[in-house]
Amino acid sequence: MNCSDYLLFDPVLPNSTIWYQFNSNNIGDSLQISIDIINIPFGIEVGGALQLRLVKKNNSCSAIDFVPVGTSFSSTSSDTVFIFTQLQTNTEYAIVLNENTFGVANPGIDFQIMISGKSVEIPQFTGSISHEDTLCKNEIGTYSLELSNCPNVGLISWFINNELITSNNSLVFETNQVENGDTVKAITTCYSPCADPIVVVTNPINVYSFYVFAGNDTIINPGETAQLHAETNVPTYYWDTQLFISSQSSLEPFVYPEETFTYPFVAFSNGCVQYDYVTVFVRNGLEIPNTFSPNFDGTNDTWKIPDIELYPDNNLSIYNRYGTLLASYSPYTPATEWLGTWQGAELPEGVYFYILELNDKEKTLYKGTISIIR
């Protein structure tokens, strides 16, 4: 570290020391410094001793802002152990070494230094995750990670079972993805850069749920009535709308929407609420486009027929002006839209013909032309 060592030793040349900086833990107390002499280079006049001083940092990196702890120690050229006591908690200290009056920087002996003791030992860290005892299905649960003896928490990875959901710096994780019996796990680190991982896992979480099914979607013609068929295994339920419905309290009401409408079905049990939905589609005829431009610019590249999925039994045939069948679909869907090709090749610009059979109750038939524009 680039701190001034002026007057830390007397006599000593400025900037001729080696510094080892560390922070005490939240326990403090004793410190042991072990010096292991490895080699004294041939021809180096070492004077047979190392000098060592322990200092506490107050503010700046100037030597006048360091407070010596105890007195300077001198060691012989053999391995030596120094003992200090009553170190303060969570405090920045430095070990400063020099080799007599010549300093260790120009050049000195080879040695290793190791510190130990209560004041630098990493306390045993523990963790837990607090959360609600019981959740309702689809309810957002809050999971709070609580750590002890972990002064510098690293990135926290949150898991549901063993699937990673998110990584962030927050001790709180919120989600509605937990199912009954799942566990939530958090993994983080303490004491950077000596990163010791800590893994905290909840017990299996109790998520209360029950069966709710609003029924299958259905299609009707304008002016027709449909009957819904909801199911649930709890006694308290209702349809959460008063529009176009014969009864909000019946599992099988009659409905008569004037246009496509989605009916919410809600049930209650043990303070929990669950919804399901059913849609009644009202046919209003198809608006079939007569042009498209399959030039792969991301706009109008396929021949789309809006609402064609409302007629799942449809059949579609496409021809050229000579009556050659170019494509056929049973059914035509948004997943099988025509690209303006025949036998894998792009068709030229021009007019083509189609026959669309909806195969509905009315046996509706559409015939028309399609223009390809490139």
Image (cartoon, rainbow, N blue to C red):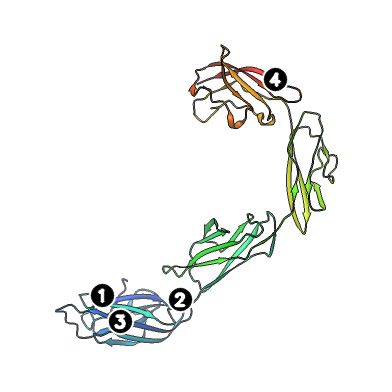
Q: Secondary structure at mark 4?
A: strand
Q: Is residue 268 above or below residue 337?
A: below
In front: 72, or 361?
A: 361
Q: Answer with mark 3 or mark 2, whichever residue precedes in sequence.
A: 3
The residue mark sitting in front, 4 or 1, is 4
The structure residue drawn at horizontal position 79% and vertical position 43%, both measured from the top left corner, is 241
Residue 15 is marked as: 1
Q: Answer with mark 4 or mark 1, whichever residue precedes in sequence.
A: 1
* Whole-percent x, y for residue 338 in the image: 56, 25
Q: Is residue 342 above or below residue 138?
A: above
* Whole-percent x, y for residue 112 in the image: 29, 77
In the visual, does 97 lie left or right of 354?
left
**What is the C-alpha distance between the residues marked 1 and 3?**
21 Å
* Whole-percent x, y for residue 113 in the image: 32, 78
**What is the C-alpha distance between the residues marked 2 and 4?**
80 Å
Q: Answer with mark 1 or mark 3, whichever residue precedes in sequence.
A: 1
Q: Crowding at label 4, few (<14), some or many (≥20) Cα neighbours within 10 Å?
A: few
Instruction: Give the residue pinned by disc 3.
Output: 35
Q: Secondary structure at mark 3?
A: strand
**What is the C-alpha distance between the residues marked 1 and 2?**
32 Å
The residue mark sitting in front, 4 or 3, is 4
Instruction: Give the residue pinned by disc 2.
Output: 122
Instruction: Give the residue pinned by disc 4.
Output: 365
Residue 165 is marked as: none
The residue mark sitting in front, 1 or 2, is 2
Q: Answer with mark 2 or mark 4, whichever residue precedes in sequence.
A: 2
Q: Answer with mark 1 or mark 2, whichever residue precedes in sequence.
A: 1
Q: Is there a contact, CB below 8 Å, between mark 3 and mark 2?
A: no
Name the residue type under label 4.
Answer: Leu
Figure quadrant of residue 148: bottom right
